[in-house]
Amino acid sequence: MCGIFAYTGAKEAGNLLLEGLVSLEYRGYDSAGIYTPESGVVKTPGAVGALRKKMPKKYEGKSGIAHLRWATHGEPTEVNAHPHTGSGEIWVVHNGIIENFKELKGVLEKKGHTFASKSDTEVLAHLIEEHMKKEKNFEKATLKALNQVRGTYGVAVQYKGEPEKLIAGRMGSPIVLGIGKNENFIASDPSPILKHTKKVVFLNDGEMAVLTPKSHTIYKLTKELVKRAPEELDWSPEEAQKGGYEHFMLKEIMEGPEVIENTLRGRLIPEKGMAKLGGLESVTKELAKIERIIIVACGTAYYAGLVGEYMLEEFAGIPVEVELASEFRYRHPVLNQRTAVLAISQSGETADTLEAIREGKRKGALTLGIVNAVGSTIARETDAGVYNHAGPEMSVASTKALVSQLTALTLLTIFLGRQRGMSAKTGKEIAKELKALPKKLAAILSGKEAIEKLAKKYSGARDFLFIGRKYNFPIALEGAIKLKEISYIHAEGYGAGEMKHGPIAMIDENFPTFALAPKDSVYDKMLSNIEQLKARKGPVIALANEGDKEIGKLADDVVYVPKTLEMLSPILNVVPLQLFAYYFAREKGLDVDRPRNLAKSVTVE
Ligand code: F6R
């Protein structure tokens, strides 16, 4: 998520590190920082431009570490920016979340450590310093500390006393080493490295590397030496930013499993069938009294809200309405203190959604947010909320943000459900299946070539219908919007039950339909709808569960996905539709990441 770049060699590190950060800036960051043992630390809110302005003209050092932060925990302030330190001896830049940082902080405070920030990363710096007291060895102390932390990290660490040496570590957050001639690098992706060397080594989870200008040694956290020859990376800088994918959209779809894990991290208590949402703690009592929720959102986020409505009503027993934010603000909604208005927004800046929240506030409702961008206006103006932790979304078409919105809505359903009538058994069942989702989604993604073929086969179509029922009705709407916005063809999403009330008149052999038909409580009804389409010669692609033999006899093509709970099926089922839209638009040679007439953040009405 955040950007890391570190250098050790013979060049002036200050400028080199700043340039490297610029090539990581494509992700859109909100604070930045740099450290060299010779000139010390400089940190600032803003990105590289702000950092450059703040740095003294003479900023020296032949090695150093630098970071761009995209806030997840804590506001984008100077104190929260990286690098972090304890007493000024050990400096750390970190991507990820240290889950047991509160526990570790408590122990360290008892030993006399005082903390400057609320950051989990600062705890790691103190922990290494604490181990240095006994070990008197930078590598051993870092190894001990990394073995103690739980959660995810990609880190680069530097010790003032050994300026030439850098240590990298990885657990769940990417780290790549750049191997140069008498100089070495650490980065969170290869983009800042490639200008200097094409030789790279990707670290695996549970590995630590020690770099000097002339050497690099990799160990497992269990201390065994790792022998891995560097590979030559023939990527252009732009390819490097996209992780080797052709477009950000595909990269972001492929991040789905990781995104689910990040949204869930530290928030599920599976053994109790409960969810812990730190962002809602301040309003727990008010939430228990809520009698109605109104979800406000736009576009894809609105469809997430529709799935949320089904979940919250079925499992938390709360009446829910979902409103297009652009409509909500212009009518006269009846609200009171026992109504919660919940905004769903990736950017946290969508003008209509923001105004809907303000309208809710004016009328005395409790306002909540499910927001991806930390510190955004909606995040600031709502009374409480849940951050998605999906990382920055670069492609205009929203994909991974939707996966995380649906995951966050499930957590909210468990949270509110357990405050009301949901049994521990149901909570446990949902939690168990939620945890299984990343693997199931990874299996879908590994079959992306089959969806690519399908998109090619249908890419001559001028119209497309998407149908689904119950939990998958909103996913049909999403399938249509995704295809429209990036391939510019006419696509409609419909509740399958509504087909006979109008849209079926359009169907002929040139008008294909994507039918969402997982084996759920409305499966038989979906089969009838598919039969009706086939009776009018309409080509049908069905999305079905693995092992469903019946559907192959009806549909022209089938995309199989693993089975999960009905309420969770949208999280899996939406991804083949995202891939379909992606490959369809790519086949047409369109600018997938920047579709015409659209902006990533709609800050006007
Ligand atoms: C579709 C898409 C848009 C956004 C909508 C809301 O792919 O990206 O429909 O979902 O503009 O944006 P946020 O979530 O930023 O409020």
Image (cartoon, rainbow, N blue to C red):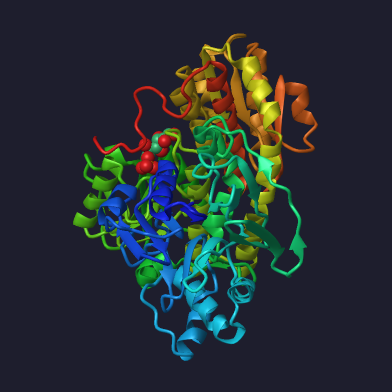
Q: In which quarter of the image is the C terminus?
A: top left
Q: Which of 110 and 605 is in front in this view?
A: 110
Above or below for 507 versus 484 = above
**Whether residue 433 is situated above or below residue 140 in the rendered picture:** above
Q: Can residue 565 be seen in this view?
A: no
Q: Residue furthest left?
A: 362
Question: Going by the image, does 130 lie left or right of 366?
Answer: right
Report the side of 487 relative to 365 (left or right). Answer: right
Q: Where is residue 463 in the image (x, y as percent from the top left)?
A: 51, 15
The residue nearer to you, when weighing 388 against 119, is 119
Residue 442: where, in percent of width, then height? 67, 44
User: Which of the two residues, 529 or 29, is positioned nearer the viewer here?
Assistant: 29
Q: Position of residue 76 (x, y in %)?
A: 33, 59
User: Relative to the observer, which residue lies in front, 361 or 140?
Assistant: 140
131 over 480 or under it: above or below: below
Q: In which quarter of the image is ligand 1?
A: top left
> Going by the picture, which residue comes out furthest to the top?
509
Q: Which residue is drawn at 43% across and 57% down?
A: 66
Please give the count of numbered marks on the rendered protein: 0
Q: Position of residue 455 (x, y in %)?
A: 62, 21
- Residue at 63 percent of width and 25 percent of height: 529
- Give the quarter of the image for residue 286: bottom left
Q: Can residue 10 be seen here?
A: yes
Left or right? Give the position of 248 relative to 447: left
The residue located at (51%, 39%) in the rendering is 195
